[in-house]
Image: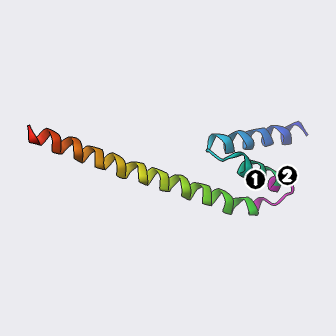
Amino acid sequence: MAEARETSVIVYRNLIDAGCDEATTKKCMLLLQAGKKSDVFPILSRHRAALLDSVHKGQKQIDCLDYLIYSLKKQN
């Protein structure tokens, strides 16, 4: 039984480390405890997509800054 508890703690920590909010984390944990692992995958996929969108947005902002820096240096 201790092994199941340890696994639960690891999953919980991983959800938090992955940036899941409290509601998402709680929902995933409840589904997993109810044996509905397949219902967790769409939730995790949506969170992953949101994180990837954030990365792409950040990369676009970095590209804009790089271009601005390049343009300003070129003027001198």
Q: Is residue 61 left or right of residue 75?
A: right
Residue that numbered label 2 is attached to: 33
Magenta region, residue range: 31-38
Q: Residue at x 77, y 59 (%)?
A: 37
The amino acid type found where label 1 is placed reads Cys
Coordinates of residue 70 in the picture (x, y in percent) = 18, 43
Q: Quadrant of the C terminus?
A: top left
Q: Quadrant of the N terminus?
A: top right
Of discs 1 and 2, which sits in the foreground?
1
How many C-alpha atoms fall within 10 Å of the one at disc 2: few (<14), some, or many (≥20)? few
Q: Is residue 13 above or below residue 32?
A: above
Residue that numbered label 1 is attached to: 28
Camera-nearest residue between 8 and 61 = 61
Camera-nearest residue between 22 and 13 = 22
Farthest residue toward the right?
1
Q: Is residue 37 above or below residue 62?
A: below
Label 1's element?
helix
Task: Pick whichever of labels 1 and 2 is earlier in the sequence.
Answer: 1
